[in-house]
Amino acid sequence: MAVAPLKVGIVGLGNVGTGVARILTDHPHRIAERAGRPIVLKRAVVRNLNKPRDIRLESGVLTNDIQAVINDPEITVAMELMGGIHPAREVILALLKAGKDVVTANKALLCEHGNEIFHAAREYGRTVCFEAAVAGGIPIIAAVGQSMAANQIIAIQAILNGTSNYILTEMQANHQHYHTALKQAQDLGYAESDPTLDVNGLDAAQKLGILCQLAFGTRVTTSQFEIQGIDSLDLSDLKCASDLGYHIKLLAQARLTNRELEMSVRPTLIRKDTPLSQISGPFNAVLLEGDMVGKMWYSGRGAGQAPTASACAADLIDLAVGRAQLTFERLDLWRERPEYPVMPADQTTSRYFLRLRVEDKPNVMAEVTGILGAKGISLASIVQPEAPEVDAKSNTPVVPLVIMTHRTTAGQLQEAMSELDLSSSVRGPRICLAVAD
Amino acid sequence: MAVAPLKVGIVGLGNVGTGVARILTDHPHRIAERAGRPIVLKRAVVRNLNKPRDIRLESGVLTNDIQAVINDPEITVAMELMGGIHPAREVILALLKAGKDVVTANKALLCEHGNEIFHAAREYGRTVCFEAAVAGGIPIIAAVGQSMAANQIIAIQAILNGTSNYILTEMQANHQHYHTALKQAQDLGYAESDPTLDVNGLDAAQKLGILCQLAFGTRVTTSQFEIQGIDSLDLSDLKCASDLGYHIKLLAQARLTNRELEMSVRPTLIRKDTPLSQISGPFNAVLLEGDMVGKMWYSGRGAGQAPTASACAADLIDLAVGRAQLTFERLDLWRERPEYPVMPADQTTSRYFLRLRVEDKPNVMAEVTGILGAKGISLASIVQPEAPEVDAKSNTPVVPLVIMTHRTTAGQLQEAMSELDLSSSVRGPRICLAVAD
Ligand SMILES: NC(=O)c1ccc[n+]([C@@H]2O[C@H](COP(=O)([O-])OP(=O)(O)OC[C@H]3O[C@@H](n4cnc5c(N)ncnc54)[C@H](OP(=O)(O)O)[C@@H]3O)[C@@H](O)[C@H]2O)c1
Ligand SMILES: NC(=O)c1ccc[n+]([C@@H]2O[C@H](COP(=O)([O-])OP(=O)(O)OC[C@H]3O[C@@H](n4cnc5c(N)ncnc54)[C@H](OP(=O)(O)O)[C@@H]3O)[C@@H](O)[C@H]2O)c1
């Protein structure tokens, strides 16, 4: 019984697109068996036809004319793998309008224009799949959309940027400096050529936004919550955290608290004896807490050609089988039903780790704890880990002070830090990092 | 637009059945929204109508007559949650014959009679869902069956028995003795009232069997591979492993090597700085390696009422949406296509950790390494960690010897151990445990 093949057009044959094309051309039998029908790459659209490619395609497949996909009625599924906002947005809208289901890995686009794209898909009766957009190889979209379906998700804790995690692992394990580790990440192909969004937390924030829309039905923009990158971390911060029994990770968090969403992306101390702290190198991890299933978590490669292509190919197979269409219908996504508002950043709560340099004189400890206490911040521990040194500027002896607070609001902490900055006994630079529960 | 509700019959209202009934009765709106239609519990079958129940059901729902489900054409989905082999097998076959899709959490039954059950389902055009049968709350069936669809899975490493993992965690972290920890596991409801299958490795082996059938298309019985429980482990083994930088976990493993399946379930040393070693308490974890996506892993509660019921309810929702039917059609399960045979146990390879007590005399080290070397076993390290003591039986001084081998076959190791047992210099008890890569 021969079933008609599914014909696919790929728009963008770069890192990810080439990976998908390879799976389809290298493993046609495997894919046909899993999908119930052959999946055939009919067109691959690029900008530059003369660029050397890492893959041999049958003649006529490669084109620089996007219309060759849009106007071909045989092509029922198109993959947007070009990246960026424009013209990716316009291309997807045109593909949907032309009656094609769409697979995309474009988190930046979905975070910013997901609303419009998902509306268009519903209007045209089409399906959008985006498993590869968040945490590459980790099937987190399937987990939230299907496997956790009996749960209300109440919390997300995730490592969503492989480049940052690679850099932090190198700093922690091999005592590399930030810039050396970043350079390595670029050489290994983990970081984008412009790694700004990787290390400043925005890439992770876009992915957290997509996860929150899935898990909580709330449309979130990256301006609504605190985002801090790893670019200002120092080796000594990691060392100091390690001495206290913690690793530092770029943690994306969302928690449902009194029907509000507490969200943040920032370097966070995580106890070493937890699995999340052991996620090393370019791996991602997502911890979900459901009201039925309790804590669940997932880890895998967050990016890279083969893992990302594996997720895109799973989307293709889901479309060929007909599952993706059923799932999409039920996804509570971009439906403009903002059930849970995002909590203002200064009201979010956390434990914190503070590192100050203070003058080495009798009443300083009392002054610091007094300032924190006056803002209602209570301390879990306070240690002075090293011998005094002499502050170059003021020529006075200074000592480091490491403080762990109990849970407090970001607002209270901010006020206390401002007061500490005014105190003549406190010298910069000072460090203030969140501590995971 | 009112959609007809899906009517469900639950056979077995014990721990898991009550959990499922609770989700359906406590969260009808949530379930209806995710499933696209209401899911209604029409009948719940028990043995003893007079037993007190933790749940209030509408009158007429509770029955002790299985025919009330089998013969009710309105009930299109039935859940087998009674456990055991008989009459669970006969009940499922009758339900399928009566035209019902079936959800089950019964790993013992699936491991032993999965073949027959899945054949019957295909014959009658029905679907069998079993997400809860392996690793409770972890959606591992969906991961293997859908998310990894573009991959050939090449290896599985998993912690599949929560009771064993709880016991090992208590021994490791709190220095509890085996029997104290087992008692606690029973008090906390993690262990079955007869915990034999939990601690002797058979429960984990049944689950590994199901995973292998899914991942490799090979029908495996528990007699085909090495199964060792945690019931003979001593606190001092965990202590000694810990000093070397390892935790001991009951690890279920399968690996595709030269088109054969290397399988085992046994206490295994895992490096402390890996996430798998940090899985603590009643949690399960599954690490999958795919040829595209690389290493992926999943962790969550392996058992317990709410997590298991959450997985069963996800199956129900998948059936209501229509996804499960599509997935089942494509699952490469029990199709009697034994592509990859199971490798004979003595040919499987691993690194090993050996702990011997030997006489404290000059040539013993040479004798021991000589015996191992003659069997082709090379050593990664050998240490004598403690001061000599006097052997009570022979009244001679003995010292412990801790050896890490390089990769060797189980057969070679077995031969070497037999020879060591014959040596007059070696005293029992001796310990020999696998070491994970
Ligand atoms: N790389 C990863 O590991 C990863 C992981 C997860 C998600 N993603 C997402 O996947 C998407 C693709 O990433 P990538 O790394 O594969 O990008 P890439 O290597 O830069 O490839 C982009 C491709 O799109 C083509 N293209 C760009 N603009 C075009 C236009 N206007 N018309 C036609 N073709 C155009 C390029 O053509 P030429 O080849 O002719 O230049 C190139 O083939 C992005 O959204 C990214 O965020 C990537
Ligand atoms: N417990 C877990 O955490 C867990 C996790 C994963 C999978 N599982 C699997 O889930 C299944 C159920 O486990 P469970 O812990 O819920 O078992 P359970 O608490 O022992 O409950 C069994 C239920 O089945 C009923 N039953 C037994 N034999 C019957 C018969 N012949 N006719 C009608 N009803 C019968 C019992 O009726 P009465 O109430 O009248 O005695 C009881 O309600 C098993 O296959 C188990 O392996 C359990």
Image (spheres, coloured by chain):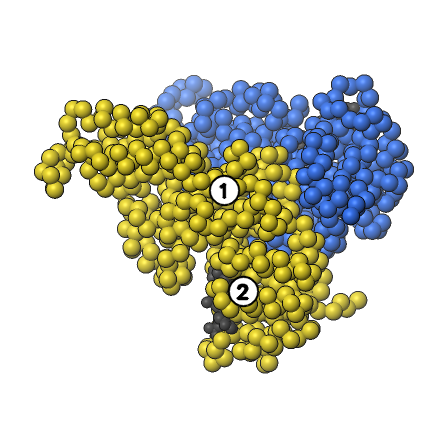
Chain colours: A yellow, B blue
Q: What residue occupies the far left of the structure in this picture? A: A395
Q: Nearer the viewer, residue B83 or A367?
A: A367
Chain of the residue displaying label 2: A
Q: Which amino acid, mark 1? A: Val
Image location (x, y in percent) of residue A66: 57, 75
- Secondary element under disc 1, as helix, strand or loop, is loop
Q: Residues within 10 Å of mark 2 (few under 14, many from 20)?
A: many
Residue that numbered label 1 is attached to: A342
How far apart are labels 1 and 2 at the CA level?
26 Å
Q: Residue at x 71, y 69 (%)?
A: A5
Q: Residue at x 47, y 81 (%)?
A: A50
First along the sequence among labels 1 and 2 = 2
Image location (x, y in percent) of residue A414: 33, 37
Q: Nearer the viewer, residue B308 or A134?
A: A134
Q: Is residue B15 left or right of residue A52?
A: right
- Secondary element under disc 2, as helix, strand or loop, is helix
Q: Is residue B241 left or right of residue B386?
A: right
Q: Which mark is residue A89?
A: 2
Is any atom of residue A105 visible in this view?
yes
Q: Which amino acid, mark 2? A: Arg
Q: Nearer the viewer, residue A97 or B306?
A: A97
Q: Is residue A157 left or right of residue B42?
A: left
